[in-house]
Image (cartoon, rainbow, N blue to C red):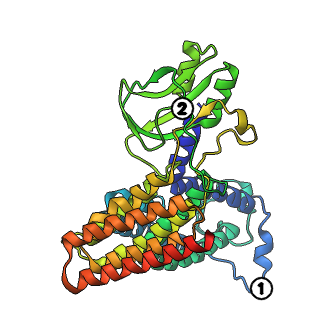
């Protein structure tokens, strides 16, 4: 249940309508508070401010109508621009990046600001009373010294919100074209990937996850979908409560369907109720997400690189940027102990055993997946070899450096099938430089 609630909150926070809806409700409440202050006479001091000329009913009504009308028009334009940008990005960079743009807080808060200003202005507009209108009650008549009723405080707040909205509009017009720049897109994915690596593997080291799998009674899935979130804390609590060991059969991001095991339970006394509670710790959905899944972000970088190197696009420099960030993430993975911190301080006797992770898997998932496309481009091939060399010299583990060297050798063999002439010679020279640096680093450590 905790996993479901946590996941629902994260998805709700990522939806494009959530912040506009929240801002609309807050603007409505703010309008009621300001109107109450105006009707109660708490804002009469504004009439005595020399530099703040009190507004007349007709002018106040016109101003609020202009603000409300312009804000809803701008909100419609902002939404249209966002949809166009999202369509362009998903078609150019890949459909998996659609979630990144929909979750962009700059777009969400921009639309929310315009919607909130519109709701506030429209709510205040209904309280403005012209000079020849009959007051609704005595309190309304006493709210201001001017004939009719003009909520001076509410009008001032509406003006401030309008100024803020103009500033947000300027920000939005700069944010959208900046946000769909491919370098910015890749930088966002790469930074998010680096953060995910640090969060998933908090300890530095050179060892991979222990292969301590234990056989037990499998727990089967009842519906198909991608594993989007695993509530490890609830799994640990259930395992300790029933004195059993839980061995996971899937990772976050894996696709499962009915009849497949998601974990195995051994020892203890895990009842049917316990097994159902364990099954509820897994959130399944229609698509993969970056939550608890660094591989998803690696796949996004690989997808951008593959699209850039396709014959229809032929943009090796975009692929180069993706390779650079892929190298940075691989270097961070190479300096981490690839063991998930599930039980925290009680990790020594942790009853939950996830699938073991290893550096080889991540190297093949990243550089191995993009290798065939990189081998067709002399520019990308040289950069990938250079990136592998730069990653290798930062690692202390000889075994992990040899994995990178093996990936470089595979790239050279693939390039020999795709390139020829001077292009192939340059790739060979870059590989020789990698071999030289690799031997020098190995000699120094020996």
Label 1: element kind:
loop
Tell me, for residue 184, which label it has, or none.
Answer: none
Marks 2/1: CA distance? 78 Å
Q: Nearer the viewer, residue 65 or 404?
A: 404
Q: Position of residue 22 (x, y in %)?
A: 57, 53
Mark 1: give few (<14), some (14-19) or many (20+) Cα within 10 Å. few
The residue that label 2 is drawn on is 213
Q: Position of residue 253 (x, y in %)?
A: 44, 44
Query: Can residue 105 be seen from the camera position used here?
Result: no
Query: Can residue 241 be seen from the camera position used here?
Result: yes
Q: Nearer the viewer, residue 283 or 143?
A: 283
Q: Residue at x 57, y 20 (%)?
A: 266
Tell whether 162 sits left or right of 243.
left
Tell whether 109 sits left or right of 408.
right
Q: Position of residue 4 (x, y in %)?
A: 55, 35
Q: Residue at x 64, y 77 (%)?
A: 55
Q: Position of residue 96 (x, y in %)?
A: 36, 56
The residue that label 1 is drawn on is 50
Q: Nearer the viewer, residue 205 or 405?
A: 405
Q: Pointer 2 and pointer 1: residues touching (CB < 8 Å)?
A: no
- Quadrant holding the C terminus: bottom right
């Amino acid at each position: 249940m905790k996993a479901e609630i946590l996941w629902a909150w994260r998805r709700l926070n990522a939806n494009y309508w959530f912040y506009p809806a929240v801002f609309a409700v807050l603007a409505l409440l703010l309008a009621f508070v300001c109107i109450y202050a105006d009707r109660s006479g708490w804002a009469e001091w504004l009439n005595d401010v020399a530099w703040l000329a009190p507004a007349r009913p007709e002018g106040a009504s016109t101003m609020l109508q202009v603000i409300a009308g312009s804000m809803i028009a701008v909100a419609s334009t902002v939404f249209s621009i966002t949809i166009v940008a999202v369509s362009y990005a998903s078609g150019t960079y890949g459909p998996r990046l659609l979630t990144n743009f929909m979750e962009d807080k700059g777009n969400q808060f921009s639309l929310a600001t315009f919607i909130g200003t519109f709701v506030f202005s429209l709510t205040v507009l209904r309280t403005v009373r012209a000079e020849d209108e009959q007051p609704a009650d005595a309190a309304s008549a006493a709210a201001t010294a001017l004939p009719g009723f003009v909520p001076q405080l509410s009008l001032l707040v509406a003006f401030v919100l309008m100024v803020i909205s103009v500033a947000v509009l300027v920000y939005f017009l700069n944010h959208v074209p900046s946000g769909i720049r491919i370098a910015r897109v890749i930088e966002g994915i790469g930074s998010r990937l680096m953060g995910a690596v640090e969060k998933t593997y908090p300890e530095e080291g050179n060892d991979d996850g222990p292969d301590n799998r234990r056989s037990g009674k499998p727990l089967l899935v009842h519906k198909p979908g991608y594993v989007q979130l695993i509530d490890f804390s609830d799994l640990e609590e259930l395992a300790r409560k029933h004195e059993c060991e839980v061995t996971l059969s899937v990772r976050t991001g894996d696709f499962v369907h009915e009849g497949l095991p998601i974990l195995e339970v051994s020892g203890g006394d895990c009842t049917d109720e316990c097994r159902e509670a364990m099954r509820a710790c897994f959130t399944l959905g229609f698509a993969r997400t970056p939550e608890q899944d660094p591989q998803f972000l690696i796949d996004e970088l690989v997808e951008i690189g593959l699209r850039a190197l396709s014959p229809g696009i032929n943009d090796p420099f975009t692929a180069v940027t993706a390779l650079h960030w892929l190298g940075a993430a691989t270097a961070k993975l190479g300096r981490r102990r690839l063991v998930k911190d599930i039980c925290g301080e009680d990790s020594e006797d942790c009853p939950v055993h996830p699938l073991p992770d290893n550096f080889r898997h991540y190297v093949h998932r990243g550089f191995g997946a993009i290798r065939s496309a990189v081998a067709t481009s002399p520019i990308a091939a040289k950069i990938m070899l250079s990136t592998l060399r730069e990653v290798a010299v930062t690692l202390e583990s000889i075994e992990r450096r040899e994995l990178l060297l093996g990936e470089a050798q595979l790239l050279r063999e693939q390039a020999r099938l795709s390139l020829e002439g001077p292009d192939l010679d340059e790739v060979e020279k870059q590989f020789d430089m990698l071999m030289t640096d690799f031997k020098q680093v190995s000699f120094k450590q020996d």
